[in-house]
């Protein structure tokens, strides 16, 4: 269960013709992918929620805190991705350092994370598009507006979006990169418009107090207080104050989810040893700067107590007497969520592909397309499943499941860096995580802290999904593992 797959064997597997992916991505493509998946719902929605309910103007500090947690993990990801340039991200890294069962668990976790993320974001995209359609007098039949709409049963727009993105991914990574680059340019332009235009409407008094005094929520708790934190640390749930910043950080962490998807494209990168660290760290830095700037602008335009929870950026400009910008922001959000869906779907198919190539899932899914050199079988399968899920899914608390899955992956990757440094000190590392083991330990501690701040229901659902995964591993994966069969000289 704890047998490891050597780095050399992982790389050799990528050279088999029928299982090989085309190398077409540069550092610029990776950075664009990272920015494309990170900037999404978080910056357009969560800013107002946490400012009004948890941190006030200090929301900017919450973004910094969440960004630091991601940066600690990003440094660990960068070492692994440059040393083991193989599809699968944290799954592949765990297989090379900790062992097969932990690798399976993290792969199973990533499948859930990316699938739920894709479906939820597709539903959010559908809502923005319907709003834009309503503004110009176009209306869908009520039954096709999705479960969130009155009388709706099936979200046709979310369903079609996932299917179209599935086709794009089958046709090749370079096409996906080009489309993503165009969409990301539009999205970043909209964010810059918000920042620059908003500067002219900032009122200094809105920043007072920058860190509002702590208050105990009515009823002794809030939607985001964690019973685990209370149990372990004697923490009394409060809003605002210094603890409010950390609570806000655990929420806005959702806005950073996706930078780890860049690591899933390591096998399709021309020079992964050089370009993977640049893509991972570059995209994270750009997005953190943009997030902090937006948080400062929006809380300066409107007092935090008056911010909208559902559409803070758009409503802040409406309050300033400029509704035109609200339409621009809605358009940017709709366009931006397209790339989030695309790259989350890409990440999931690459993890699924890597697991099937290792025999832990049926090897039928590890064959690449003879022309496009993409993992078309898992892409089509997962694309159809997620499209159906998105069509029938109502947005609820699934986002917290995505959060806990990502943080769990961060813990495993940081632990893997320390293990591989000890077991394979001879490996050539184009990029080295600094201050090992101190930095990985800090990454683990910071990730666990944010996990503890998530609701207890999220932990329960996560445990159920992990239990199902362990059963699947023992019923199928352990017996069909390619590494295990090689040890027994058995055919695949």
Image (cartoon, helix red, strand yellow):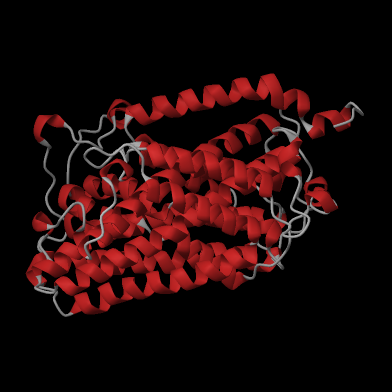
Q: Is residue 166 left or right of residue 141?
A: right
The quarter of the image holding the C terminus is top right
Q: Residue 255, position in %: x, y?
A: 37, 54
Q: In the rendered view, would you say 449 is above or below 248?
A: above
Quadrant for residue 168, please give it: bottom right
Q: Residue at x 25, y 50 (%)?
A: 245
Q: Residue furthest right?
A: 489
Q: Residue at x 34, y 27 (%)?
A: 457
Q: Residue at x 27, y 41 (%)?
A: 148
Foreground of the two, 51 or 448: 51
Q: Is residue 300 left or right of residue 175?
A: left
Q: Is residue 434 visible?
A: no
Q: Residue 290, position in %: x, y?
A: 35, 68
Q: Is residue 90 left or right of residue 3?
A: left
Foreground of the two, 116 or 287: 116
Q: Residue 339, position in %: x, y?
A: 46, 60
Quadrant for residue 117, please give it: top left
């Amino acid at each position: 269960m704890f047998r490891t797959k050597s780095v050399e064997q992982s790389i050799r597997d990528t050279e088999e013709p029928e299982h090989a992916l085309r190398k077409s991505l540069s550092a610029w493509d990776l950075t664009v992918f990272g920015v494309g998946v990170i900037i999404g719902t978080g910056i357009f929605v969560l800013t107002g929620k946490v400012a009004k309910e948890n941190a006030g103007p200090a929301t900017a500090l919450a973004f910094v805190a969440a960004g630091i947690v991601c940066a600690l993990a990003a440094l660990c990801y960068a070492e692994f991705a440059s040393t083991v340039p193989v599809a699968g991200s944290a799954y592949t890294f765990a297989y090379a350092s900790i062992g097969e069962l932990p690798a399976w668990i993290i792969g199973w976790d990533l499948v859930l994370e990316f699938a739920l993320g894709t479906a939820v974001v597709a539903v959010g995209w559908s809502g923005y598009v319907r709003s834009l359609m309503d503004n110009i007098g176009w209306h869908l039949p009520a039954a096709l507006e999705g479960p969130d709409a009155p009388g709706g049963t099936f979200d046709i727009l979310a369903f079609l979006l996932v299917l179209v993105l599935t086709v794009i991914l089958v046709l090749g990574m370079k096409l996906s990169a080009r489309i993503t680059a165009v969409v990301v340019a539009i999205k970043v332009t909209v964010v810059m418009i918000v920042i620059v235009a908003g500067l002219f409407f900032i009122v200094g008094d809105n920043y007072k107090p920058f860190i509002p005094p702590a208050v105990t929520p009515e009823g002794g708790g809030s939607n985001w207080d964690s019973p685990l934190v209370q149990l372990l640390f004697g923490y009394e749930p409060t809003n605002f104050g210094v603890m409010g910043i950390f609570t806000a950080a655990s929420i806005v962490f959702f806005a950073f989810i996706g930078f780890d998807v860049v690591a899933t494209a390591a096998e399709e990168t021309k020079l992964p040893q050089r370009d993977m660290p640049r893509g991972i760290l570059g995209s994270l830095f750009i997005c953190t700067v943009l997030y902090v700037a937006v948080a400062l602008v929006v809380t300066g335009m409107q007092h935090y107590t008056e911010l909208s929870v559902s559409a803070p950026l758009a409503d802040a400009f409406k309050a300033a007497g400029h509704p035109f910008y609200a339409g621009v922001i809605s358009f940017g959000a709709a366009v931006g969520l397209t790339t989030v869906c695309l790259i989350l779907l890409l990440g999931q198919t690459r993890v699924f592909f890597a697991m099937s190539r290792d025999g832990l899932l049926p090897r039928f899914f590890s064959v690449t397309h003879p022309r496009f050199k993409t993992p078309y079988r898992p892409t089509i399968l997962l694309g159809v499943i997620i499209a159906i899920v998105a069509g029938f899914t109502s947005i609820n608390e699934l986002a917290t499941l995505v959060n806990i899955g990502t943080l769990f992956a961060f813990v495993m990757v940081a632990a893997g860096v320390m293990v591989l440094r000890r077991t394979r000190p001879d490996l050539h590392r184009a990029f080295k995580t600094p201050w090992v083991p101190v930095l990985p330990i800090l990454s683990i501690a910071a990730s666990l802290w944010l996990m503890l701040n998530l609701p207890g229901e999220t932990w329960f659902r996560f445990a159920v999904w992990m239990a199902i995964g362990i059963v699947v591993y023992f019923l199928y994966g352990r017996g069909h593992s390619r590494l295990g069969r090689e040890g027994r000289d058995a055919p695949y």
